[in-house]
Each structure stands twice: as structure tokens, then as C-alpha cells.
Amino acid sequence: MNRTSAPVDAPATGAWEGLVTTALLGTDRRTPPRTGPGPEAPVALLDAAAVETVRRRAGLRPARAAERPRPAPEDPRPPLPPAAARRLALLLADRPGASGGGRRGTAPDLTELLPQWLAAANARGFAPPPQVLPALLDAARGRTDLRPTVLEFAGPRALWLARLNPDWRFALRSTPGGGAALPHLEDDDGVRQLWQEGLFAERVALLSALRSRDPAAARDLLATTWATERAEDRLMFLDSLRTGLGPDDEPFLEQALADRSRNVRATAAELLSALPGSALAARMAVRAEACVAIDHTQATQATQATQAAGGTEPSGATVATPTIAVEAPHECDPAMERDGVVAKAPAGRGERSWWFGQLVEAAPLGTWSRRLGGRTPREIVALPVTDDWQGELHAAWCRAAVRQRDAEWSRALLGEPSAPEAGGPGAVSLAERAKLLGTLDAAERAEWVAGFIATHGLSEAFQLLGVCAVPWAPPLGRAVVDALNIARDAGSYPWSFSGVMGLAERCLDPSEAGRLEALLAVPDEPENASPGAGGYWAEAFQRLVTTLRLRAAMTEELNTS
């Protein structure tokens, strides 16, 4: 067969795809370029494919060499102690789901210990070994919750790597300015130039840093460009004023109440309502006071009945308790809207109750003692409320207590942790109780949750445990362990407590490990126990003890110089 009888031209751009199509269709239906049908067509196709294969492999023209990357920046922080570096490598080598699911067994969940390890290393100011930086960035790529602590720990070299690998570009987006250094805050010209010319992330970082150091200077800087900023940017910048919020911010926030963006107006109103001495808070107090008052009707009737009986209480009669009466607003006027009241109620919500809740939420909590007869918050919360308004009124007071960080009102709304009703006198949900607890100091918070668990058990305590400081204070840790032990002895389903057990692994003080030794044996199962529950409980407590000891070892390794 004469392979040279049919000339083969060099295939043009896209020729490889054309040759593949010809091979698929067959040369009887489609012939290669410059070749007619016949026995030579298959040979011409193979020749053309051989030429194109060589061209695809070696047909690149020499190009100018790319600029070599600059050396990675130095990390001035001290290196990790060797034992801590080995521990980090083990934590990073563990992957979620590596066990294949099902029964967890007694092995600690290393992926859940990594955030705690990173926080501890950051608190001590260590730098990571360079060889673990890729694994750190891979871990942060897969878990957004890890990104802040990973990027803080990884330092400037992680950003240098991120510029070389598209998979790690999230680090540049997550770091304000992509790692660009902010000017010294004393450098007025540098600050002003970055504010006027920088990228949005750089400007947010600059404003936040300046706000933390000098709230007035940050606010003045924002005012210089406020009128020309985009609405979504104004909202983000305004949110930065939460740091160091004070009375001096009121004039700027009052101007923002007239902003053309509804979201900006709402945020400005929220910030002003968090300042009990602001003019907006006073306006809201007047509106809210017009809606809430003491109803003296029942008390008057009780007094009249006593007098009619000759000045003594009639047999079997009870003295009426003063009652809170509520008259919700009948309209949402333009002045209310300007002060942040949203006129349109959500689906399924009555307009009047919607407006009423917003007014009470924004009014200073000091309003109510004066309005309701000088009573304390605890006394006010205990008063009955007419016409089924109690839930709406107490829920608004809960939001106000959280917004204004008022611990006294939070205590009143939380009630005693040992109260029979787990919902409390004022909070209508455990989520609200968790927010109220956040206004108390760490010790009081832990003590209250411990009392709640002692009375109500663990089934309703998960959200409350999540707001407690780590490691848990001894009274709280003991309450959790005691409740788990009671559930174990009762033969309860252990997997019903898996969430609390997972929290305990991360939050229980490692010093509690010794007290748990007695719980490692497989317990005798009651007759009504779930089959196999004893084995599961033993595994769960073994895993808890092992994890606590591992956490103690992690801390010791980081403290070793």
C-alpha cells in the first residue's frame, strides 16, 4: 500500500476534533481533507492523525519564561513546640467520614478538636510549620467555620500560597484586602488614601480597625464619603459602628434615619434604640407607654367588695392583682416608619401586634418601672396581662433586654431555672432564653444552666449549653455528667443524647476525666431499656474520657517551651 500517494496537509486549528468525527463516521461517509473516497482514505486519516498527535505533543512555540515568584514572607512568630507540631499533623490527617459512618466507637473525633487546638495555638501566638500550610488551607477550604482561625494561625505565608493556587483563593477573599497591610492608623494621609481608593474589603477592614481604636475618627472618616456610597456598602459600613457604639454616634445615626435605603434606615434605628438615652429611644418610649398601662379596674372592684363586707375580706374571696392592659397602635404613621418601624407585617401576623412589638422592643427598658408603678423588672414580668397580649409583650421585652444588654431584665424574663415551666415567665422559646443568657456574665450563665439541667434534664438544654463559656464551669460540668448518668441508668436511648455528648467532648473541663471512670463499665440494663443501650453508653463514656485526656495533652504540648 502506497502511503505517499495521497498528500496530507497539516490540519488547521480544531483539526483534531474533525479527525475524531471522521473516524467515528467512517471514511466512506466522510473523507479527510484533500482526499477523495476510496481505499486510500483510511490511510490518509491515520497519517493525518499521526501528524496532529506529534503537533499536539510538541507544537508549542518557545515562550518567555514566567517571572519567578517572590520568596514567601517571613513569619516572626515563634515556632510550635515539636510535640504540638506532631499533634497538628495528626489532627489535619483525620478526615470527616473516614470511619464510614455507623457506630462511632471509642475513638475521639479529631475533626471536632481541630478548632479548639487552633484557638489555643492562636492565643499563644505560635507560627505553623511551613510543611503543614497546604493541609491547613485544604481543611479551611472544606470547612468555612475553620477559615478565621486557620488564616490567623497560618499567617502571611498562607496568603502567599493562596496567590499561587486557585483552590485556595478563598483565603484572599476571606482576608480583608487579600492580605494587603493596612496603613498605620496614625498615618492620616495613608488612611485617607486607602479609604478613597481601596477595594471594598480593604475599606471595611480599615474602618473596623479604626473603629476599635478611635470610634470618633472612624465615624468621621465614614461621613466624608457617606453620601456617595452604594446602599449595600452603606449598610456594611454602618454595621461597623456597633463596635464602640455610644452617645456621640447619635447625630450621625439620626441622619441615617432619612436614608433612601430601607435596610440602612432599619439598622440606624436599631443602633439608636440600643442607646437608651437617644432621642429615638425617647420617642419610642412615648409611643410604647401609650400602649401599656396598669388596669386598676379589677383592683378597684376588689376594694369595693372588701368595703361592702365591712372592711374585711369576704370569705373565699381573693384580692385582685393589678393587671397590665395593652392597647396596640391602630396605624403606623410616617414618623414611626422613619424611626425604623416596619409597616408591612409578615404573612400570618396581625399588623397591630407587629407594630406593637417593634415599639416595645425599641423603648428603653427603664421606661417600664416608671410607667408601671415603680415596680422592679421581676415584679413587672410577674403581672398578668389582659387579652392574651402576654406572649407578645414578653417576647418584645426579651428582644429589648438582648439589644440593650440589660442583665436585670434578662434575669427577670429568664425566671428561676428550677421553675416548673421550662419556658420561663417571659421567654417564649429556648432560643430566646439562650439569647437572654448571653447578657449575663459567664459564671452566672453557667450556674443558671446547671440549675435548669438539674430540674428539667438535658432534653431541652442543648441550645442553652451552646452559649456557655468553654471549658464549662465545674457546677455546669457536674450537672451535665449527672444528667447523662441518670439517663444511662434509666436505660434511655443513648443516641438521643449524642448532641449533648458531642458538646461535652469539646466543652467539659478535662479535669473531669477522673470522675467519669466509674461510668466506663457496661451497665445492667433495666427491663424497659433499649436493647444494646448499655454497650452504647459504655462506648460513649469511654470516648468522652479519651477525648478529655487528649484535650489535656494538647494543652500541655502547647505550653511546653
Image (cartoon, rainbow, N blue to C red):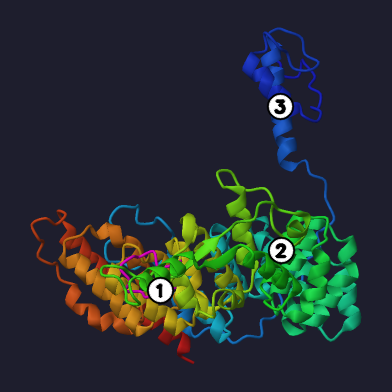
State the image coordinates of residue 208 (x, y, percent, origin top left). 73, 74
| Magenta stretch bounds | 414-426
User: Per the image, is 416 magenta?
Assistant: yes
- In the picture shown, does residue 369 fall above or below 385? below
Looking at the rendered structure, the kind of residue marked 2 is Thr
Name the main secondary structure of what is drawn in magenta.
Answer: loop
Which numbered circle lies on residue 415? Answer: 1
The residue beneath circle 3 is: 17
Along the polypeptide, which appears first: circle 1 or circle 2? 2
Q: Quadrant of residue 549?
A: bottom left
Name the residue nearer the viewer: 110 or 225. 225
Q: Residue shown at 66%/70% (left/top)? A: 285
Q: Is residue 160 visible?
A: no
- In the picture shown, does residue 36 fall above or below 340? above
Along the polypeptide, which appears first: circle 2 or circle 3? 3
The residue beneath circle 2 is: 267
Query: Could you give the CA–CA distance between mark 1 and mark 3, rounded to whole angstroms?
Result: 75 Å
Looking at the rendered structure, the kind of residue marked 1 is Gly
